Amino acid sequence: MKILIIEDEHTLTDSIVDYLHEEGHICEAVYTYNNAIEKIEIYDYDCIVVDINLPDGNGLDIIRQIKKNAQSLGIIIISARNSLENKIEGLEIGADNYLTKPFHLAELNAHLKSINRRIKFNGNEHLIFNEIKIFPNEHLVFVNEKEIKLTKKEYELLIFFISNKNKVITKSGLAEHLWGDFMDTADSFDFIYTHIKNLRSKLIKEGCEDYIKTVHGVGYKFYIS
Amino acid sequence: MKLLTKTSLNYLSVTLFVFLFSTIAFYYLLRHQVNQNINIELEKRKNNIVNQLLSAHESNATPTNQNEKVVITPLNQIVSPQLSFYDTIIFEHNEKKYIPFRQLGFVTNFNNSAYYIQIYKSLEETDNLIIRIFFIMTILVVSIIIILLITVRHTSLKAWSVFYDTIKKINNYDINSHHDFSLQQSEVKEFDDLNRVLKSMTERIEKDFSNMKEYTENASHELQTPLAIINSKMELLLQSQNLDEKQMNAIADAYNASNRLSKLNKTLLLLAKIENRQFPESKLINHILLIENQLESLEDLIESKRIKVIKRFDNNVSIHMNPYLAEILLANLIKNAIRHNLQNGDLIIDVAHDRISISNTGNELKISKELLFERFHKQSSSPESLGLGLAIVQKICEIYSFKVDYNFENNIHTFSINMNKK
């Protein structure tokens, strides 16, 4: 995908660009509101990642401008402010997601993958990874053409892994993806272990290879050589 | 007691005292004055009679009116004449009753003989007169007292009304409601001063409060950005291929610590915001629905620990709360109940019409009951547990005046929230 990153904190922007570049996306970065407006007028993007607090303007206005231009692209808001009003406003004016800083790059990546699928398949989304086939709109998972039943959390875990394949995903990244921003999600790490164990066994039972590798002390990796 | 009552009572007791005193004094003065007048009148009549006697013969006509009556008796017939004013009661034939009279008796010479003469004046009318005058005076004075009292009270009330209005407004003052805090003007300088000072004080408080709110939000914002940078760099580092296990662990530890910092920051900010009543929105909450959502979100864990969930929903609690806080409140309690539960344990959730209680089987507490809700005291030995979950529960209950209780009996921990505000 062609992605425009609008964030005034350079080091953060660099990290995001690096990560997404690894994933095969084409990334551009701007650091101010005015530059952002310029870019979206001239070029077409598949998706933008926009920070609300820019030095010379409000990221939400960029979104409004995009909507006014009737441009259709994925919009992900990133913001340090965790206020409910901002979230609601952002989603109401047409953003696809609202991520609060600090967020896990894997999380951002997963959302981008989801937007990508939507753009590419436009209703017929499907994920194919070797013997695993997923139809996100119907929440159907097939291994070797046979349907397997996953719980909601196991399903979300699988999609997250596949979206971030070959990337080390930390336990906290997984925890936040599954249970969101709730304070004090302690011992969720033990919870995660349980989920992964269950997911693994369900996949392997149907003849799936064991792609989920434990990275000791850190997290997990959905590994394909 | 109220100032008005105090001054009124003072005023009343003083005036009553003065009133009693002066009434009695007035009565005696009046009586004395009247007696004086009567005496003077009798004296005059005496002089008249003496003059008349000197110039005329004794009258044979019997005066019908006792007032005109003159009783003349030769002196030698009387042993000890009363030579002065004398009060007596005489049976008046016309009126057929006893009437008080004042009598003046004197001796005079007439035709070379000494005679004892008695003249009379009826006291009946003057007595009536005195009583009437007395009555009128009393009524007048009492009226004056009452009118003055009413006037004083009315003036006071008007003057003090501004003060009472100020007190009511201070009572209703809520820093979060953003209502204009305006006080009435008063003609009384002291109240005007008071109101001015109060207004400037509240303005200062509001400014400080809004600064603090801004600060807490900005502090969070400022902290989160560098944390975001740290996290993103760490996450990138972790993807490096040529790290050995030790290096990986080091990075992971740093990353986890940074995450904890970020969570801690968010949680403390939440606590501060709750304390500052920054969640004023209030809606009717469907607590049962929230509980069901939580249970669904955590169903995998419940299943993996083989926890039996027992739901006793009698009827829903109808309470108005901020929906975000309601969710956090229930989520924290349910998560705790799962986390500290035993394998194959029970999770019991009771919802009655104003009480919610969440119980779980578990081991005894390692920390004392009193410290349970204190920040950073944790039952869980996991370093990831912030120990703030129950502090948040308590804070939310505090601002809604809910009572939260903990009980441990028969190896069952029970947290109950009583939402009955009485």
Image: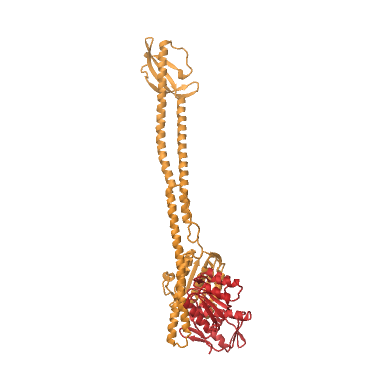
Chain colours: A red, B orange
- Residue A90 screen position, x and y as percent: 55, 71
Q: Is residue B86 above or below residue B269?
A: above
| Residue at 56% across, 80% down | A2
Q: Quadrant of the N terminus of chain A?
A: bottom right
Depth order, front residue of B46/A109: A109
In the depicted view, which residue is nearer to us: B410 or A82?
A82
Q: Nearer the viewer, residue B275 or B109?
A: B275
Q: Residue at x 42, y 46 (%)?
A: B6
Residue at 41% over, 20% down: B42
* Circle count: 0
Q: Measured from the top left, where is residue B97 in percent x and y?
A: 48, 24
Q: Is residue B406 visible?
A: no
Where in the figure is residue B112, as x and y percent of width and height?
37, 9
B114 shown above or below A201: above
Q: At which x and y percent is residue A117?
A: 59, 81
Residue furthest to the left: B80
Query: Of B7 and B265, which appears nearest the observer?
Result: B265
Q: Is residue B22 above or below residue B270?
A: above
Rendered residue at 50%/57% (across/down): B180
Asked if one can make out residue B196 in the rendered structure from this viewpoint, the answer is yes
- Residue A160 to residue B120: above or below: below
